[in-house]
């Protein structure tokens, strides 16, 4: 059996630092969760052919989550001539088509018709949707963020093991149920250790370590990985989560592989 794993390509929030790009991961090097700007070279440095990644699950259309679609589609165009039909880009149904169209225009401009004869497949996703790819069942939940956003739960069909990605979201009561008993939970902690001021957070709708711990505890997730945090807030977020939680908590260190 191929053991399921997550590879971290980036875990920064909207502020990249040396050796850490925006949040971006693979699941078993076959599914991409969000696309950071350095995604193509990150995959290559990890020994993964970007053409082997046929599905991108975009959590939402903020630039720190989708900008890597541009180099990825450019790479497919270079290597697959003008045929991008092997690439599926899935994301919030309200926005995914518009942002992929915009990105194609940005990359290929008025040469689009010549550069891309077969378009990538666009898959709009909403609450409760499920799809199957590369031995995984992908389940979709609406996150609570400043723009339409999705959380994803991926179940490795052979082993039954599962991993959850919150994407960007503030706490909502439905999240622990969606992530019930996952083996690995990647939770964003943009707001550092916490606590969160709900008035301030009404607009941006993010989470701190305190919400990550709450979701982990209420869901029964076996292991917590904190991610999507500015470097200066990272250690205090990790310290707070470890203080509050009686199970394994780690930082989603870029370049790391986490079996689940
Ligand atoms: Zn973000
Ligand atoms: Zn966002």
Image (tube, helix red, strand yellow):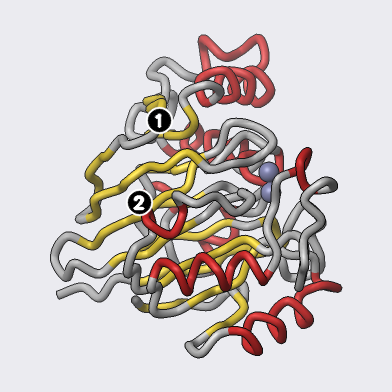
Picture quarter with the C terminus: bottom left
Please tell me whether residue 33 is drawn above or below residue 78 in the rendered image: below
Residue at image x 77%, y 69%?
194
Residue 209 picture quarter: bottom right
SS at mark 2?
helix
Q: Is the residue marked by circle 1 packed among few (<14), some (14-19), or many (20+) residues within 10 Å?
A: some
Residue 102 placed where, x, y %?
63, 19
Q: Is residue 19 left or right of residue 216?
A: right
Please tell me whether residue 106 is drawn above or below residue 26 in the rendered image: above
Residue 210 picture quarter: bottom right
Residue 98 picture quarter: top right
Q: Is residue 55 left or right of residue 200?
A: left
The one of 129 and 220 positioned closer to us in this rendering:
220
Mark 2 or mark 1: whose residue is earlier in sequence: 2
Question: Could you tell me how far apart the alpha carbons at marks 2 and 1 are, in whole angstroms?
Answer: 26 Å
Query: Are the residues at dot 2 and dot 1 in contact (C-beta closer than 8 Å)?
Result: no
Q: Identify the residue under disc 1.
A: 126
Residue 26 placed where, x, y %?
44, 59
Residue 56 placed where, x, y %?
44, 43
Q: Is residue 92 visible?
A: yes
Residue 52, labelled with which disc?
A: 2
Please identify, in this view, whether the residue under mark 2 or under mark 1 is nearer the observer: 1
């Amino acid at each position: 059996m191929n053991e399921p794993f997550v590879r971290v390509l980036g875990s920064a929030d909207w502020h990249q630092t040396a050796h850490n790009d925006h949040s971006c991961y693979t699941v078993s090097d076959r599914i991409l969760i969000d696309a950071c700007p350095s995604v193509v070279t990150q995959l290559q440095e990890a020994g993964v052919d970007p053409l082997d990644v046929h599905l991108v699950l975009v959590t939402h259309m903020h630039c720190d989550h989708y900008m890597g679609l541009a180099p990825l589609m450019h790479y497919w165009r270079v290597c697959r001539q003008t045929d991008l039909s092997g690439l599926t880009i899935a994301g919030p149904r309200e926005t995914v088509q518009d942002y992929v169209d915009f990105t194609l225009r940005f990359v290929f401009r008025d040469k689009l018709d010549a550069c891309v004869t077969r378009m990538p497949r666009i898959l709009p996703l909403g609450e409760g949707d499920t799809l199957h790819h590369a031995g995984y069942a992908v389940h979709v939940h609406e996150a609570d963020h400043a723009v339409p956003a999705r959380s994803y739960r991926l179940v490795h069909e052979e082993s039954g093991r599962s991993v959850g990605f919150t994407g960007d979201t503030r706490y909502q009561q439905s999240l622990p149920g969606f992530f019930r008993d996952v083996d690995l939970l990647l939770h964003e902690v943009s707001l550092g250790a916490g606590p969160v001021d709900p008035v301030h957070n009404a607009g941006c709708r993010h989470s701190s370590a305190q919400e990550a711990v709450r979701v982990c505890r209420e869901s029964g997730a076996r292991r917590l990985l904190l991610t999507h945090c500015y470097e200066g807030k990272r250690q205090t977020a990790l310290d707070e989560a470890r203080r509050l939680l009686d199970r394994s908590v780690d930082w989603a260190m870029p370049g790391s592989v986490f079996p689940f």
